Image (spheres, grey):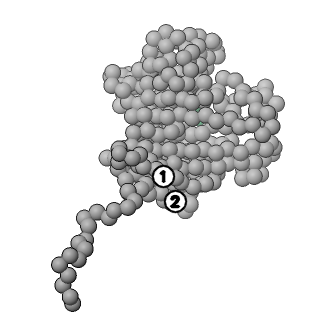
Amino acid sequence: MVDRPNKPMALATTPGLPPQAQVNITHNNSRVSAVLPTGESVEVLLYGATLISWKDRAGSERLWLSEGAKLDGSKAVRGGIPLVFPVFGTAPEHKAAGNLPQHGFARTSKWEFLGKSTSESQGKNESSVKLDFGLSAATIDDETKKLWPYNFSLIYSVSLTPTTLSPASRSPTMDIAQVSVTGLDEAEYIDKVDGAKAKKQSGTVSITGETDRVYTPAKGPSEPVVVSEGGRTVYSVVRDNLEDVVVWNPWTDKAQGMADFEPKDGYKNMICIEAGAVKGWQKLEKGDTFEGAQTISV
Ligand SMILES: O=P(O)(O)OC[C@H]1O[C@@H](O)[C@H](O)[C@@H](O)[C@@H]1O
């Protein structure tokens, strides 16, 4: 062997592509998970395209998921982040949506995984990943087709960066007694636990009993809704084209009444902040699309 004085040396790191997010399809093709090079991760169940996990780089879970949640496609997932379409709650008087189950069928339909895209933000050494899911008139099951015999298609994108998730909304908190929600001051809301009365929020929201409210913040979607615990920000939600914010906590009796809500005192450790177009219908002309988003920052 000829010894060359200037032969190339092995490099400590391989130049070229920076590390990218790893995306895997697991659990017999029923879940999609993504892990960023920095360690943050998400897991999406194709059933409902429900986000069932969002972990920080140390592996700590950020979402509340009931210990009794069914993850086998037999029932809408209790907890995590569901996607609701075409109706939030029920609409018994509505011609088309009147026969649908509570919160429609998107959260109980099997979505398709359409693919991933990754990106790196130059200079910041930060990677992100976007997972796309689809559901359409062509892919829903026959039972659902009977209930909703209309043409539609939905694309749901879940983007993860080290500090944000779009979209997201349910998060574990340590102690509901310490939780306050800002960004809803002066907002009109419908109080679903008080005969659907129209009310107006004054100051921050704290949870001291069963809470089920549909807020329409006057300052619009870009005003952050911030969940704090003991004065420390836990996360904030900024919406895009989603006018309403639902705040829900079942409290003692409702939690007791839900077979899949576990542990029964789990209501002390969760709050549900849901961004959406909830209060009114979105009217689309043939061929039109509606787009909405939320970004949760920690
Ligand atoms: O039991 P479900 O259908 O998952 O609904 C749970 C709750 O979901 C919330 O989003 C609604 O505001 C509540 O009214 C509802 O009770």
Where is 198 relative to 44, above or below?
Answer: above
Cα gap from disc 2 to disc 1, whole angstroms? 16 Å
At 35% across and 31% down in the image, what residue appears? 174
223 left or right of 103 in image: left
The spot of residue 220 in percent (x, y) is 56, 20
- Report which residue position mark 1 lands on: 118
Q: Residue furthest bottom?
A: 1
Q: Mark 1, residues whose alpha carbon is within 10 Å: few (<14), some, or many (≥20)?
A: some
**Type of amino acid at the residue the image marks with label 1:** Thr
Where is 240 relative to 161, above or below?
Answer: above
At 41% across and 46% down in the image, what residue appears? 121
Of the 4 image quadrants, the one containing the N terminus is bottom left
Of the 4 image quadrants, the one containing the C terminus is top left
The spot of residue 78 in percent (x, y) is 53, 40
Q: Earlier in the sequence, mark 2 or mark 1?
A: 2
Please give the count of numbered marks on the rendered protein. Answer: 2
Q: Which element is circle 1 on?
A: strand
Q: Mark 2, residues whose alpha carbon is within 10 Å: few (<14), some, or many (≥20)?
A: some
The spot of residue 103 in percent (x, y) is 65, 35
268 left or right of 49 in image: left
The spot of residue 282 in percent (x, y) is 71, 29
- Report which residue position mark 2 lands on: 25
Q: Is residue 12 at all visible to an observer of this figure?
A: yes
Residue 217, image quadrant: top right
Frontmost of labels 2 and 1 is: 1
Residue nearest the viewer, comparing 276 with 173: 276
**Type of amino acid at the residue the image marks with label 2:** Ile
Residue nearest the viewer, comparing 26 with 270: 26
Ligand 1's image quarter is: top right
